[in-house]
Amino acid sequence: AQSVAQPEDQVNVAEGNPLTVKCTYSVSGNPYLFWYVQYPNRGLQFLLKYITGDNLVKGSYGFEAEFNKSQTSFHLKKPSALVSDSALYFCAVVNAGNNRKLIWGLGTSLAVNP
Amino acid sequence: DAGITQSPRHKVTETGTPVTLRCHQTENHRYMYWYRQDPGHGLRLIHYSYGVKDTDKGEVSDGYSVSRSKTEDFLLTLESATSSQTSVYFCAISEITGYDTQYFGPGTRLTVL
């Protein structure tokens, strides 16, 4: 079965420290991977995506993600966390075999402490 | 929010009443989606549309219907609302399904009493 896993429900990090939000996937064929962020009482906002090419993808607000095919992972990273980064983060992957609909992770709540 | 509006933004209704949520886009994107978001379940696709009058079911379509008579509008109808349909509903759009980025509206918080 094709799936996305975000193994941590919550991540806590101190402001100024690097942050990582983890995502692993299981799909047939080549994956197309996405990260979205949701601030309180808002809709989801696109951060970045991996389609092909360079394994390190840079996105909005200083975030980046590294595609690792051998580990089937697409972890979201930022070198120095801000309190304003506190939000809910979702990883998603395209299910190429099923009308190309996105498969969503359950989300990881990131709390950046001052 | 990428030219996407949802109405109403909040609604409280009673069990058994019909409810229609509207999604309106100004981006002229071909694909439109309705999701619901619930704690512990993440985002779940209800229905989607790949063109005017072309719609298909998602993973949680029971109890919901949709219509798309114009490119810019995608309506979600709960024919007879139930308490299990209390949720936050998000509309999304994309130019190309799956491989392209989806852009989300601000959401509608629906409470069914």
Image (tube, grey):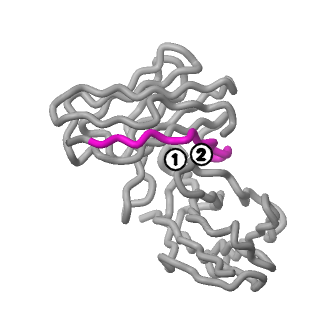
Q: Name the quarter where the N terminus of chain A is drawn.
A: bottom left
The outermost residue toward the front is A114
Q: Residue furthest top?
A: B69
Q: Element type at marker 2?
A: loop
Q: Quadrant of residue A16?
A: bottom right
Kind of residue at badge 2: Gly
**Location of residue B23 in the rendering, given as x and y in whole percent from the top left corner:** 51, 28
In the image, residue B64 sits, relative to residue B99, either above or below, namely above
Q: Which mark is residue A101?
A: 1
- Badge 2 crowding class, 10 Å Cα cut-off, few under 14, some 14 to 19, many 20 or more, is many
The answer to whether residue A63 is left or right of residue B6 is right
Find the distance from the CA under tag 2 to the CA under tag 1: 5 Å
Residue topped by disc 2: B98
The residue segment tinted magenta is: B98-111
* Residue A47 higher or lower than B113, as above or below: below
Chain name for mark 2: B
At 63% from the left and 81% from the top, the residue drawn is A71
- Residue positioned most to the left: B16
The quarter of the picture where the C terminus of chain A appears is bottom right
Left or right: where B112 falls relative to A4? left
Considering only vertical position in the picture, is B29 above or below B47?
above
What percent of the width, then of the height, locates residue A103? 50, 56
- x and y percentages locating residue A87 in the rendered image: 59, 65
Asked if disc 2 and disc 1 are in contact, CB closer than 8 Å, the reply is: yes
Label 1 amino acid? Lys
